[in-house]
Amino acid sequence: MSRKFLAAKKDIADEFINLARKKGMTVTKLLNETLRNAIALEKNGLTLNKAVDEYLIIKAAQESGFILVPAELIYSLLDKATSKAIEEIMNSWRDIGRWCGKSFSIRFTSNPHDLLKIYIANIIWGLSDFIIEGNGESINIRCIGSSLNEKYTRGIANFIEGFMESLDYKCIRKDIVKGIISLKLRKT
């Protein structure tokens, strides 16, 4: 079997060697496994850095009490809820958004655009489009999810508002219809 030698910074190489030891693997075996996985990710349109970032977001959400629930179950529960219960649920979405925004801004140092984009892409499924535009003082957010029902769409909008409130943004305009959210926020 032919081999190639690869160069790495000494501190990274030392950590990698220690990791191989901890796992009971040879450096060559761990390196081949790591490279094989990085190549597989790239072939599927995902960089190793993005995969690590997304894994850390999912792990943090899981540790924060998030669970996977089929969308149809959520839609059914929302459809059966009374008007009073819906308002309480919408307030809960906003409160959870605030908590997540604060929690994730502490755990992951990033600008609000990136933080929200990474978070929403990995936690709120069913969106075909999620666009954030702005300059830091003013942010426009647009979400499209054709399969989302009206109440779930409102919940997501409230979650995003709460998330951004925790990062010192206030919603100054919102348009929400089944499957479509458009928010304009300003730094406070």
Image: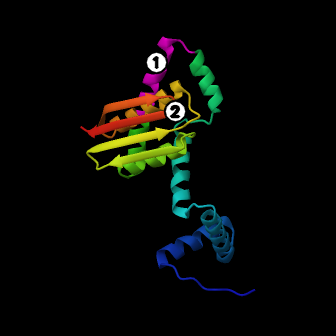
Q: Position of residue 9 (x, y in %)?
A: 48, 78
Magenta segment: 81-98
Is residue 85 located in the magenta-colored stretch of the structure?
A: yes
Q: Position of residue 57 (x, y in %)?
A: 51, 48
Q: Position of residue 123 (x, y in %)?
A: 53, 41
Q: Which mark is residue 184?
A: none
Report the label total: 2
Residue at label 1? 88
Q: Is 133 positioned to the left or the right of 58 in the image?
A: left
Location of residue 82 with respect to 161 vertically, above or below = above
Secondary structure under the numbered disc 1 in the rendered image: helix
Q: Residue at x 48, y 43 (%)?
A: 120
Secondary structure under the numbered disc 2 in the rendered image: loop
Farthest right residue?
1
Q: Quadrant of residue 103?
A: top left
Q: Residue at x 45, y 47 (%)?
A: 117
Residue at label 2? 179
Q: Is 17 positioned to the left or the right of 139 in the image?
A: right
Dominant SS of magenta comes to helix
Q: Quarter of the image for the C terminus: give it.
A: top left
Mark 1 vs 2, N-terminal side: 1
Give the amino acid type for the residue marked by disc 2 in the picture.
Answer: Gly
* Frontmost residue, 21 versus 42: 42
Query: How far is disc 1 from disc 2 in space, using C-alphas?
Result: 21 Å
> Mark 1, residues whose alpha carbon is within 10 Å: few (<14), some, or many (≥20)?
few
Give the amino acid type for the residue marked by disc 1 in the picture.
Answer: Glu
